[in-house]
Image (cartoon, rainbow, N blue to C red):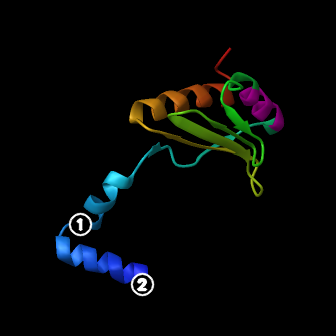
Amino acid sequence: MIAFLMVLDILSAKRVPFSNIVSPLKRYYSTGEINFEVEDKDAKIEEIARKFSNGKVDHLDGITVEYNDWWFNVRKSNTEPLLRLNLEGKTRELMEKGKEQLIDIIQGKSS
């Protein structure tokens, strides 16, 4: 509650939209969650792990791979027959490039 009141105080003092205050804090561009229907979800996650083994890999929830300027997570849905992709990059270009690479792999378009 106190934090909310402090934010209101800042907004009233600066007389600018909240989005103007938080936009400098935004560090990454995000794809949001993208869903894919995939027959063999485990095999697809293994393929992604092989192709992105040069990053920092974590298998806690599907596969998460981190690089210096972008990261992604691909995981199986617990409630639907889907793979879910979330990706963030420090620039829109990095985010789009990573998204294209992963979509191609997930949809079977890469070699």
Q: Which mark is residue 2?
A: 2
Would you identify the image quadrant in which residue 108 lies? top right
Q: Residue 47, how many percent across, how many down?
A: 76, 26
Residue 53 magenta: no
**In-front residue for pair 20/45:** 20
**SS assignment at label 2:** helix
Picture residue at 34% right of the left edge, 79% below the top: 6
Q: Residue 68, how many percent across, how many down?
A: 54, 33
Q: Residue 85, how many percent across, how many down?
A: 62, 42
Q: Magenta region: which residues?
A: 42-49
The residue where tag 1 is placed is: 17
Q: Which kind of residue does numbered mark 1 sit on?
A: Pro
Q: Which mark is residue 74?
A: none
Q: Earlier in the sequence, mark 2 or mark 1?
A: 2
Picture residue at 79% right of the left edge, 38% below the top: 41
Count neighbours of disc 2 (C-alpha within 10 A) and say few if under 14, some if 14 to 19, many if 20 or more.
few
